[in-house]
Amino acid sequence: MPALSLADFDFALPPELIAQHPAPERSASRLLDARATALVDRVFAELPELLRAGDLLVFNDTRVIKARLFGAKPSGGAVELLVERVLDDGDVVAHLRASRKPAAGTLLRMEGGFEAELRGRWPDADGALFRLRFSGEPYALMERHGHVPLPPYIHHADDADDARRYQTVFARVPGSVAAPTASLHFDEALLAALAARGVQRAEVTLHVGAGTFQPVKGDDVAAHRMHSERFEVPEATLHAIARTRAAGGRVVAVGTTTVRSLETAAQRCRLDAIAGAVRGETSIFITPGHRFQWIDLLVTNFHLPRSTLLMLVAAFSGLAQVQAAYRHAVERRYRFFSYGDAMLLQRRAD
Protein backbone atom coordinates (compact mmCIF):
# COMPACT_ATOMS: atom_id res chain seq x y z
CA MET A 1 0.00 0.00 0.00
CA PRO A 2 1.20 3.61 -0.55
CA ALA A 3 3.15 5.35 2.19
CA LEU A 4 0.96 6.99 4.81
CA SER A 5 0.97 10.75 5.28
CA LEU A 6 0.02 12.54 8.46
CA ALA A 7 -2.48 14.54 6.40
CA ASP A 8 -4.47 11.32 5.88
CA PHE A 9 -5.39 11.45 9.57
CA ASP A 10 -6.16 15.15 9.90
CA PHE A 11 -9.60 16.73 10.03
CA ALA A 12 -11.15 20.06 10.95
CA LEU A 13 -13.08 19.98 14.20
CA PRO A 14 -15.12 22.93 15.48
CA PRO A 15 -13.92 23.56 19.06
CA GLU A 16 -17.46 23.54 20.40
CA LEU A 17 -17.75 19.82 19.51
CA ILE A 18 -15.05 18.89 22.04
CA ALA A 19 -17.08 17.57 24.97
CA GLN A 20 -16.23 19.30 28.23
CA HIS A 21 -18.62 17.24 30.37
CA PRO A 22 -20.15 13.75 29.98
CA ALA A 23 -23.72 13.12 28.88
CA PRO A 24 -26.22 13.25 31.78
CA GLU A 25 -26.48 9.44 31.69
CA ARG A 26 -23.68 7.16 30.52
CA SER A 27 -25.70 5.14 27.99
CA ALA A 28 -27.57 8.23 26.73
CA SER A 29 -24.60 9.31 24.62
CA ARG A 30 -24.87 8.95 20.86
CA LEU A 31 -23.58 5.94 18.92
CA LEU A 32 -22.67 6.15 15.25
CA ASP A 33 -23.21 2.74 13.68
CA ALA A 34 -20.43 2.76 11.10
CA ARG A 35 -20.26 -0.95 10.34
CA ALA A 36 -21.42 -0.42 6.76
CA THR A 37 -21.19 2.30 4.12
CA ALA A 38 -24.65 3.54 5.15
CA LEU A 39 -24.02 5.28 8.48
CA VAL A 40 -26.78 5.12 11.10
CA ASP A 41 -27.26 7.53 14.01
CA ARG A 42 -28.19 5.71 17.21
CA VAL A 43 -28.15 6.04 20.99
CA PHE A 44 -25.58 4.02 22.93
CA ALA A 45 -28.30 2.18 24.88
CA GLU A 46 -29.22 0.48 21.57
CA LEU A 47 -25.94 -1.49 21.55
CA PRO A 48 -27.55 -4.79 22.71
CA GLU A 49 -29.76 -4.75 19.60
CA LEU A 50 -26.62 -4.64 17.42
CA LEU A 51 -24.98 -7.67 19.04
CA ARG A 52 -25.92 -11.36 19.14
CA ALA A 53 -26.04 -14.10 21.72
CA GLY A 54 -22.60 -15.67 21.80
CA ASP A 55 -20.72 -12.46 21.03
CA LEU A 56 -17.97 -11.51 23.48
CA LEU A 57 -17.38 -7.97 24.75
CA VAL A 58 -13.83 -7.40 25.99
CA PHE A 59 -13.34 -4.46 28.38
CA ASN A 60 -10.27 -2.80 29.92
CA ASP A 61 -10.77 -2.94 33.71
CA THR A 62 -8.02 -0.46 34.59
CA ARG A 63 -8.79 2.19 37.21
CA VAL A 64 -7.86 5.85 36.75
CA ILE A 65 -5.73 7.17 39.61
CA LYS A 66 -5.80 10.77 40.85
CA ALA A 67 -2.41 11.24 39.29
CA ARG A 68 -2.14 15.06 39.17
CA LEU A 69 -0.40 16.46 42.26
CA PHE A 70 0.67 19.99 43.17
CA GLY A 71 3.44 21.15 45.47
CA ALA A 72 6.45 23.41 45.87
CA LYS A 73 10.23 23.29 45.68
CA PRO A 74 12.31 24.36 48.70
CA SER A 75 12.61 27.78 47.00
CA GLY A 76 8.84 28.11 47.04
CA GLY A 77 8.49 27.71 43.29
CA ALA A 78 5.43 25.77 42.15
CA VAL A 79 5.72 22.21 40.88
CA GLU A 80 3.16 19.90 39.28
CA LEU A 81 3.47 16.14 38.99
CA LEU A 82 1.54 13.82 36.69
CA VAL A 83 2.27 10.32 37.94
CA GLU A 84 2.74 7.92 35.04
CA ARG A 85 3.18 4.72 37.03
CA VAL A 86 4.04 3.25 40.42
CA LEU A 87 7.05 0.93 40.28
CA ASP A 88 7.31 -2.40 42.09
CA ASP A 89 9.65 -0.92 44.70
CA GLY A 90 7.14 1.82 45.57
CA ASP A 91 8.87 4.66 43.71
CA VAL A 92 6.73 6.65 41.31
CA VAL A 93 7.53 7.79 37.79
CA ALA A 94 6.07 11.14 36.84
CA HIS A 95 6.04 14.01 34.40
CA LEU A 96 7.29 17.10 36.26
CA ARG A 97 6.39 20.67 35.44
CA ALA A 98 8.29 23.57 37.06
CA SER A 99 9.86 26.84 35.97
CA ARG A 100 13.24 25.17 36.52
CA LYS A 101 13.61 21.43 36.97
CA PRO A 102 14.93 20.61 40.47
CA ALA A 103 18.06 18.51 40.93
CA ALA A 104 18.17 14.94 42.18
CA GLY A 105 17.92 14.82 45.96
CA THR A 106 15.48 17.75 46.14
CA LEU A 107 12.67 17.29 48.64
CA LEU A 108 9.35 18.58 47.30
CA ARG A 109 6.60 19.60 49.70
CA MET A 110 3.30 18.43 48.24
CA GLU A 111 -0.23 19.64 48.88
CA GLY A 112 -1.71 17.50 51.64
CA GLY A 113 1.48 17.65 53.70
CA PHE A 114 3.49 14.76 52.29
CA GLU A 115 6.95 14.91 50.71
CA ALA A 116 8.33 13.67 47.42
CA GLU A 117 12.08 13.08 47.11
CA LEU A 118 13.36 13.52 43.57
CA ARG A 119 15.67 10.62 42.78
CA GLY A 120 16.59 11.43 39.18
CA ARG A 121 15.47 10.92 35.61
CA TRP A 122 13.70 7.81 34.34
CA PRO A 123 14.19 5.34 32.70
CA ASP A 124 17.79 6.57 32.47
CA ALA A 125 19.82 9.72 32.98
CA ASP A 126 18.44 11.21 29.74
CA GLY A 127 14.84 10.14 30.32
CA ALA A 128 11.96 12.58 29.92
CA LEU A 129 10.30 11.38 33.15
CA PHE A 130 11.35 11.65 36.80
CA ARG A 131 11.61 9.06 39.54
CA LEU A 132 10.40 10.07 43.02
CA ARG A 133 9.90 8.52 46.44
CA PHE A 134 6.79 9.62 48.34
CA SER A 135 6.74 9.78 52.15
CA GLY A 136 3.81 7.36 52.22
CA GLU A 137 2.01 4.73 50.16
CA PRO A 138 1.62 6.27 46.68
CA TYR A 139 -1.87 5.08 45.78
CA ALA A 140 -3.29 6.16 49.15
CA LEU A 141 -1.65 9.59 48.92
CA MET A 142 -2.91 10.14 45.38
CA GLU A 143 -6.44 9.11 46.33
CA ARG A 144 -6.47 11.57 49.26
CA HIS A 145 -4.59 14.52 47.78
CA GLY A 146 -4.49 14.07 44.02
CA HIS A 147 -6.66 15.39 41.23
CA VAL A 148 -8.36 13.55 38.38
CA PRO A 149 -5.94 13.79 35.40
CA LEU A 150 -8.41 15.22 32.90
CA PRO A 151 -7.12 15.42 29.31
CA PRO A 152 -5.52 18.69 28.13
CA TYR A 153 -8.52 19.56 25.93
CA ILE A 154 -10.91 19.61 28.91
CA HIS A 155 -10.68 23.10 30.31
CA HIS A 156 -12.31 22.96 33.74
CA ALA A 157 -10.76 21.94 37.04
CA ASP A 158 -11.68 18.44 38.14
CA ASP A 159 -14.61 18.11 40.52
CA ALA A 160 -16.62 15.40 42.25
CA ASP A 161 -18.53 14.64 39.06
CA ASP A 162 -15.27 14.00 37.19
CA ALA A 163 -14.11 11.68 39.99
CA ARG A 164 -17.21 9.59 39.31
CA ARG A 165 -17.68 9.90 35.55
CA TYR A 166 -14.05 9.79 34.36
CA GLN A 167 -14.04 6.21 35.63
CA THR A 168 -15.77 3.10 34.30
CA VAL A 169 -18.41 1.38 36.43
CA PHE A 170 -16.24 -1.78 36.46
CA ALA A 171 -12.83 -0.14 37.08
CA ARG A 172 -10.80 -2.56 39.18
CA VAL A 173 -6.99 -2.34 38.90
CA PRO A 174 -5.50 1.11 39.70
CA GLY A 175 -2.84 2.42 37.35
CA SER A 176 -4.16 4.61 34.49
CA VAL A 177 -3.71 8.34 34.02
CA ALA A 178 -6.41 8.41 31.36
CA ALA A 179 -9.72 6.58 31.17
CA PRO A 180 -10.47 3.83 28.63
CA THR A 181 -13.10 6.20 27.30
CA ALA A 182 -15.16 3.83 25.14
CA SER A 183 -16.13 2.04 28.35
CA LEU A 184 -17.45 5.21 29.99
CA HIS A 185 -20.76 4.71 28.11
CA PHE A 186 -21.59 1.47 29.92
CA ASP A 187 -23.79 1.58 33.03
CA GLU A 188 -25.17 -1.26 35.13
CA ALA A 189 -28.50 -1.29 33.29
CA LEU A 190 -26.79 -1.60 29.91
CA LEU A 191 -24.48 -4.36 31.15
CA ALA A 192 -27.55 -6.23 32.42
CA ALA A 193 -29.30 -5.81 29.06
CA LEU A 194 -26.25 -7.18 27.25
CA ALA A 195 -26.11 -10.18 29.57
CA ALA A 196 -29.82 -10.83 29.03
CA ARG A 197 -29.15 -10.77 25.30
CA GLY A 198 -26.61 -13.58 25.75
CA VAL A 199 -23.57 -11.38 25.12
CA GLN A 200 -20.57 -12.65 27.09
CA ARG A 201 -17.99 -10.48 28.84
CA ALA A 202 -14.24 -10.66 29.49
CA GLU A 203 -11.53 -8.28 30.68
CA VAL A 204 -8.01 -7.18 29.95
CA THR A 205 -5.96 -4.65 31.89
CA LEU A 206 -3.94 -1.94 30.19
CA HIS A 207 -2.78 1.03 32.25
CA VAL A 208 -3.15 4.04 29.98
CA GLY A 209 -0.23 6.46 30.03
CA ALA A 210 -0.14 10.18 29.30
CA GLY A 211 1.51 9.32 25.98
CA THR A 212 -1.94 8.38 24.67
CA PHE A 213 -2.43 12.13 23.99
CA GLN A 214 0.93 12.54 22.27
CA PRO A 215 0.49 13.60 18.63
CA VAL A 216 2.51 12.21 15.76
CA LYS A 217 4.89 15.05 14.92
CA GLY A 218 6.74 14.05 11.77
CA ASP A 219 5.03 13.54 8.42
CA ASP A 220 6.62 10.09 8.16
CA VAL A 221 4.10 8.04 10.16
CA ALA A 222 6.29 4.94 10.09
CA ALA A 223 9.04 6.81 11.97
CA HIS A 224 6.86 7.46 15.03
CA ARG A 225 7.79 5.58 18.20
CA MET A 226 5.01 4.64 20.61
CA HIS A 227 5.14 5.03 24.38
CA SER A 228 5.12 1.83 26.43
CA GLU A 229 2.22 0.73 28.65
CA ARG A 230 1.72 -2.17 31.08
CA PHE A 231 -0.91 -4.73 30.15
CA GLU A 232 -2.28 -8.16 30.99
CA VAL A 233 -4.61 -10.47 29.11
CA PRO A 234 -5.73 -13.11 31.64
CA GLU A 235 -5.78 -16.77 30.73
CA ALA A 236 -9.58 -16.81 31.26
CA THR A 237 -9.97 -14.09 28.62
CA LEU A 238 -7.83 -16.00 26.13
CA HIS A 239 -9.99 -19.07 26.63
CA ALA A 240 -13.18 -16.98 26.27
CA ILE A 241 -11.91 -15.61 22.94
CA ALA A 242 -11.03 -19.10 21.75
CA ARG A 243 -14.49 -20.44 22.69
CA THR A 244 -16.23 -17.49 21.04
CA ARG A 245 -14.39 -17.85 17.78
CA ALA A 246 -14.84 -21.62 17.70
CA ALA A 247 -18.60 -21.21 18.19
CA GLY A 248 -18.93 -18.57 15.45
CA GLY A 249 -19.42 -15.63 17.81
CA ARG A 250 -17.83 -12.24 17.37
CA VAL A 251 -15.16 -10.66 19.55
CA VAL A 252 -16.04 -7.03 20.28
CA ALA A 253 -13.20 -4.89 21.60
CA VAL A 254 -14.35 -1.97 23.74
CA GLY A 255 -11.78 0.75 23.13
CA THR A 256 -8.39 1.08 21.53
CA THR A 257 -6.61 0.03 24.73
CA THR A 258 -8.38 -3.33 24.53
CA VAL A 259 -7.34 -3.60 20.88
CA ARG A 260 -3.71 -2.90 21.75
CA SER A 261 -3.79 -5.51 24.52
CA LEU A 262 -5.37 -8.22 22.38
CA GLU A 263 -3.21 -7.57 19.33
CA THR A 264 -0.07 -7.70 21.47
CA ALA A 265 -1.24 -10.96 23.02
CA ALA A 266 -1.98 -12.36 19.55
CA GLN A 267 1.65 -11.73 18.61
CA ARG A 268 2.84 -13.65 21.68
CA CYS A 269 0.52 -16.66 21.93
CA ARG A 270 -1.83 -18.90 19.96
CA LEU A 271 -5.40 -19.64 20.95
CA ASP A 272 -4.85 -23.35 20.30
CA ALA A 273 -1.87 -23.40 22.69
CA ILE A 274 -2.81 -21.16 25.63
CA ALA A 275 -0.25 -21.48 28.41
CA GLY A 276 -1.30 -18.81 30.90
CA ALA A 277 -1.86 -15.08 30.95
CA VAL A 278 0.02 -12.77 28.58
CA ARG A 279 1.43 -9.75 30.38
CA GLY A 280 4.24 -7.22 30.22
CA GLU A 281 4.83 -3.99 28.31
CA THR A 282 3.43 -3.08 24.93
CA SER A 283 4.43 -0.32 22.54
CA ILE A 284 2.51 -1.75 19.59
CA PHE A 285 1.80 0.83 16.87
CA ILE A 286 -1.17 -0.17 14.73
CA THR A 287 -1.53 1.57 11.37
CA PRO A 288 -3.33 0.73 8.10
CA GLY A 289 -1.96 -2.51 6.70
CA HIS A 290 -1.99 -4.25 10.09
CA ARG A 291 -3.69 -7.67 10.00
CA PHE A 292 -5.99 -8.07 12.99
CA GLN A 293 -6.03 -11.53 14.54
CA TRP A 294 -8.97 -11.95 16.90
CA ILE A 295 -11.22 -8.86 16.86
CA ASP A 296 -14.37 -8.53 14.74
CA LEU A 297 -16.05 -5.35 16.02
CA LEU A 298 -14.79 -2.23 17.79
CA VAL A 299 -16.58 0.23 20.06
CA THR A 300 -14.57 3.45 20.26
CA ASN A 301 -14.87 7.18 20.87
CA PHE A 302 -13.85 9.83 18.34
CA HIS A 303 -10.13 10.55 18.52
CA LEU A 304 -7.79 13.49 18.14
CA PRO A 305 -6.62 14.50 14.66
CA ARG A 306 -3.21 13.14 13.66
CA SER A 307 -3.23 10.73 16.62
CA THR A 308 -2.04 7.15 16.85
CA LEU A 309 -5.53 6.17 18.05
CA LEU A 310 -7.12 7.50 14.87
CA MET A 311 -4.56 5.52 12.88
CA LEU A 312 -5.50 2.35 14.79
CA VAL A 313 -9.20 2.87 14.04
CA ALA A 314 -8.41 3.49 10.36
CA ALA A 315 -6.38 0.29 10.29
CA PHE A 316 -9.33 -1.62 11.72
CA SER A 317 -12.16 -0.39 9.51
CA GLY A 318 -10.36 1.19 6.56
CA LEU A 319 -9.18 4.76 6.12
CA ALA A 320 -11.96 5.77 3.70
CA GLN A 321 -14.68 4.38 5.98
CA VAL A 322 -13.30 6.18 9.03
CA GLN A 323 -12.84 9.45 7.15
CA ALA A 324 -16.49 9.25 6.01
CA ALA A 325 -17.65 8.49 9.55
CA TYR A 326 -15.74 11.47 10.96
CA ARG A 327 -17.17 13.81 8.31
CA HIS A 328 -20.65 12.55 9.19
CA ALA A 329 -19.99 13.00 12.91
CA VAL A 330 -18.90 16.61 12.44
CA GLU A 331 -21.89 17.37 10.20
CA ARG A 332 -24.32 15.80 12.68
CA ARG A 333 -22.72 17.56 15.66
CA TYR A 334 -21.50 14.51 17.53
CA ARG A 335 -19.50 15.20 20.70
CA PHE A 336 -15.80 14.37 20.43
CA PHE A 337 -13.00 12.89 22.54
CA SER A 338 -13.01 11.50 26.09
CA TYR A 339 -16.40 12.76 27.29
CA GLY A 340 -17.91 12.54 23.81
CA ASP A 341 -19.95 10.08 21.81
CA ALA A 342 -18.98 6.69 20.37
CA MET A 343 -18.99 4.69 17.18
CA LEU A 344 -19.30 1.00 16.30
CA LEU A 345 -16.99 -0.30 13.59
CA GLN A 346 -16.52 -3.60 11.80
CA ARG A 347 -13.15 -5.03 10.81
CA ARG A 348 -12.43 -4.48 7.17
CA ALA A 349 -12.05 -7.53 4.98
CA ASP A 350 -8.36 -8.27 4.35
Image: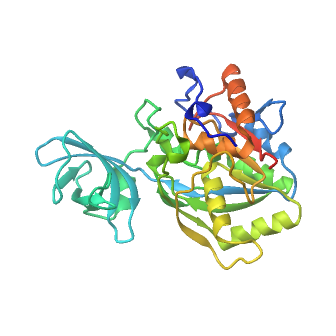
Q: Residue at x 46, y 47 (%)?
A: 211
Q: Taking 211 as reference, is 88 above or below it?
A: below
Query: Quadrant location of the N terminus?
Result: top right
How many numbered discs?
Answer: 0
Say which of 156 and 296 sits in front.
Answer: 296
The image quadrant of residue 86 is bottom left
Question: In the displayed structure, does residue 284 sit left or right of residue 185?
Answer: left
Q: Residue at x 78, y 52 (%)?
A: 296
Question: In the displayed structure, does residue 93 sit left or right of residue 277?
Answer: left
- Looking at the picture, the colour scheme in use is rainbow
Residue 128 rendering spot, x and y as whole percentages? 32, 51
Residue 54 rendering spot, x and y as whole percentages? 86, 59
Question: In the displayed structure, does residue 163 sit left or right of residue 314?
Answer: left
Could you tell me if residue 165 is visible in this image? no
Q: Taking 326 as reference, is 243 above or below it?
A: below
Residue 281 rendering spot, x and y as whole percentages? 51, 64
Say which of 14 and 269 sits in front.
Answer: 269
Residue 347 rendering spot, x and y as whole percentages? 77, 47
Could you tell me if residue 228 is visible in this image? yes
Q: Seen from this angle, which residue lies furthest left?
A: 75
Say which of 84 and 149 sits in front.
Answer: 84
Q: Residue at x 69, y 50 (%)?
A: 188
Q: Taking 269 as reference, is 250 above or below it?
A: above
